[in-house]
């Protein structure tokens, strides 16, 4: 109980709750706007973390992430345009409901089911994460090495579906991570300019590869959308309300489970929840023709997954997708190293984040339902108006890090590289993970080899390391089979 | 041999070039050491070697795949945006952030024929307000004007 109180104290002191509100409002906004996702937004805001400190920044960035899951459903329902990839399944029944004059109940179902899922996932977060802390004392360099290797493989394979491309991007990230001063020997490596002696700053790479690349990709698109002009009925009937709850609970279970698995993103969760609900859910519901269950199930699943994704992130340092990889970077930037002992090491951060999620989810229901007309109005802003201002904001953000214009130049070049990667279907999430975890992998690997006198048997003799390597092996075999099938 | 999948081929080339660069440069200029006591060159060398292997696999895939694929993407506008940002970044200390960012916004906005002057003015005012906030609110050292 003391820890829960600590969480409340963390959130409601020093105006931290204001950053939570700021995060969810911004998250809902970027979720509503197609073309500007949470990944780009979080990468743009990374420089702010230096000024805010760890707890407010992580609470704000988390708010952006789960807020965008809510916001993404609004455009899916009203305009059949998912603001986020995880809202694709919501389009099917959500937009049909709009066409049937039931836009209000559909939006209510999305908001309410997401709230149920958010609460469920938060409870899971506070229950499961402390259990992992018992493993903390058993983790040495070999275990961390194996864990990072598992993280590389899981993100490399599951986010791209192609083991060669995924691992290749991871390796490029690790190599970029070696630029700068080698901590062990003090030798400056691959630094061709003075600015690179301290390595390439993580926010610069993130803004370049995510924000700039996304802007460049979208620059040719014409995203002027038609404003929804139909009547918005706000609340569902009593009968419809009853029908929302069972698929929300099922979706929460599915999303929470898939969110725990690295690579089991909120998008996959929403697909799985919809498919399972259609197969085993209400037999009388007309899925695909505007069934309220078809909105509640995927919406609860994607929201639950986006929140339980914090469990592997905080406890094991394994991000499940690109947004989580950025969150990991933000944690490291503020001096917090994720690990199984994070609950005992950083209780304010952990419990503050958990309580902020409860607070944020409640606030999202309040924001999303009565203010739906405001969010719809936001859709009037065309993307061709937004991108020049986003470029300018990015430039200010980058400049604010070191007050150096060369950083903007590096970011522009990385933005172009990111655009080429997008065109070549090369995911940048594994690269970011490589960049973040690469220096840690090198350090732990060195230590492991020193302890074992250069013997790789250390990974076999230690049970946790061996188990993790075994998992990595299975994942590698799965990746090879999957890649060969798609050859 | 015919390149069946251009996408695989380019990816292979990217991996190989990056791998070769880091591998060769690292091997030439940094001491590798032993596995027990690694020097600064040991880790990057083996990662580069791994990347080169993956690049080689991609090359083989591009010739043997059953799925033919070409790559077609626009380069002119992305290169223009990149060069514009680079040019304005170097001009920034001389012309000030307000002018540099205004030029970036107006020039990049003109890439889209639907971009309107009123939006540019609103956006520019917003950016000026943001710059003032950064300078006077957060104490950032930044040259605002010429």
Image: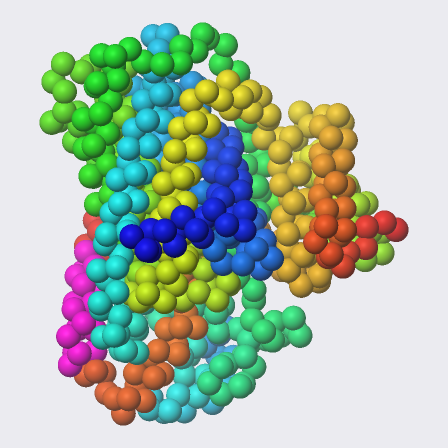
Q: Position of residue B38 (x, y in %)?
A: 39, 88
Q: Position of residue A252 (x, y in %)?
A: 24, 36
Q: Is residue A195 left or right of residue A455?
A: right
Residue at the (73%, 56%) spot, across then down: B139
Q: Is residue A474 left or right of residue B32?
A: left
Q: Assess whether residue A256 is covered by the magenta stretch.
A: no
Q: Is residue A50 left or right of residue A59?
A: right
Residue at the (50%, 39%) spot, across then down: A21
Q: Position of residue B68 (x, y in %)?
A: 34, 44
Q: Assess whether residue A462 is covered by the magenta stretch.
A: yes
> Does the image show residue B54?
no
Residue that lies at the very extreme toward the right in this rendered image? B146
Q: Is residue A137 above or below residue A213?
A: below
Q: Position of residue A365 (x, y in %)?
A: 40, 28
Res A298 quadrant in image: top left
Q: Is residue A421 above or below residue A82?
A: below
Residue at the (17%, 78%) spot, across then down: A462
Residue at the (43%, 77%) spot, across then down: B44
Per the picture, the main secondary structure of the magenta-coloured stretch is: helix
Res A266 quadrant in image: top left
State the residue in front, A3 or A117.
A3
State the residue in front, B124 or A152.
B124
> Does the image show residue B101?
yes
State the residue in front, A359 or A138.
A359
Q: Is residue A97 left or right of residue B142?
A: left
State the residue in front, A2 or A84.
A2
Task: Give the magenta range.
Answer: A459-478
């Amino acid at each position: 109980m003391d820890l829960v109180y600590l969480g409340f104290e963390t959130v409601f002191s020093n105006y931290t709750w204001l950053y939570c509100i700021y995060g969810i409002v911004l998250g809902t906004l970027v979720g509503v706007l197609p073309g500007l996702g949470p990944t780009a937004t979080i990468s743009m805001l990374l420089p702010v973390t230096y000024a805010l400190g760890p707890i407010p920044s992580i609470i704000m960035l988390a708010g952006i992430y789960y807020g965008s899951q809510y916001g993404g459903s609004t455009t899916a329902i009203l305009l059949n345009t998912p603001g986020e990839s995880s809202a694709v399944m919501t389009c099917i029944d959500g937009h049909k409901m709009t066409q049937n004059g039931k836009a209000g109940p559909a939006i209510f179902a999305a908001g309410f089911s997401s709230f149920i899922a958010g609460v469920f996932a938060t409870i899971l977060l506070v229950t499961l994460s402390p259990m992992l802390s018992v493993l903390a004392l058993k983790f040495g360099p070999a275990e961390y090495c194996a864990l990072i290797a598992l993280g590389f493989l899981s993100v490399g394979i599951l986010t791209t579906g192609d083991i060669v491309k995924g691992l290749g991007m991871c390796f490029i990230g690790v190599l970029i991570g070696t630029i700068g001063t080698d901590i062990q020997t003090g030798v400056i490596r691959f630094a061709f300019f003075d600015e690179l002696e301290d390595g390439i700053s993580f926010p610069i790479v993130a803004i370049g590869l995510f924000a700039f690349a996304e802007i460049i990709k979208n620059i040719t698109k014409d995203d002027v959308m038609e404003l929804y002009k139909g009547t918005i009925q706000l609340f569902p009937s009593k009968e419809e309300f009853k029908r929302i709850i069972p698929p929300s609970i099922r979706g929460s279970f599915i999303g929470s489970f898939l969110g725990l698995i690295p690579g089991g993103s909120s998008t996959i969760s929403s697909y799985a929840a919809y498919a399972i609900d259609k197969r085993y859910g209400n037999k009388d519901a007309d899925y695909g023709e505007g069934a309220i269950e078809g909105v509640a199930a995927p919406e609860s699943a994607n929201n639950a997954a986006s929140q339980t994704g914090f469990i592997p992130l905080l406890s094991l340092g394994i991000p499940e997708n690109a947004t989580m990889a950025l969150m990991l970077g933000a944690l490291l930037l503020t001096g917090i190293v994720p690990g199984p002992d994070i609950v005992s090491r950083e209780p304010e951060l952990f419990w503050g984040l958990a309580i902020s999620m409860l607070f944020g989810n409640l606030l999202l229901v309040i924001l999303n339902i009565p203010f739906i007309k405001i969010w719809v109005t936001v859709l009037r802003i065309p993307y061709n108006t937004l991108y020049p201002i986003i470029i300018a904001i990015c430039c200010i953000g980058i400049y604010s890090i070191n007050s150096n214009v060369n950083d903007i130049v590096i970011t522009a070049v990385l933005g172009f590289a990111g655009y080429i990667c997008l065109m070549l279907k090369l995911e940048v999430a594994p690269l970011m993970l490589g960049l973040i975890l690469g220096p840690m992998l090198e350090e732990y690997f060195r230590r492991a080899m020193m302890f074992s006198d250069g013997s790789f048997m250390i990974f076999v003799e230690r049970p946790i390391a061996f188990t993790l390597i075994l998992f990595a092996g299975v994942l590698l075999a799965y990746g090879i089979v999957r890649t060969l099938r798609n050859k | 041999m015919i390149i069946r999948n251009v996408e695989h081929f380019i990816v292979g080339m990217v991996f190989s070039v990056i791998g070769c660069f880091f591998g060769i440069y690292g091997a030439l200029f940094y001491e590798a050491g032993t596995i027990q006591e690694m020097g600064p060159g040991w880790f990057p060398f083996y990662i580069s070697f791994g990347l080169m292997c993956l690049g080689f696999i991609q090359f083989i895939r591009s010739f043997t795949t059953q799925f033919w694929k070409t790559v077609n993407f626009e380069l002119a506008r992305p290169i223009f945006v990149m060069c514009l940002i680079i040019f304005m970044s170097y001009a920034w200390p001389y012309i000030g952030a307000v002018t540099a960012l205004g030029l970036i916004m107006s020039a990049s906005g003109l890439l889209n024929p639907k971009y309107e002057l009123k939006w540019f003015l609103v956006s520019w005012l917003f950016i000026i307000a943001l710059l003032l906030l950064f300078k006077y609110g957060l104490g950032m050292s930044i040259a605002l004007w010429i």
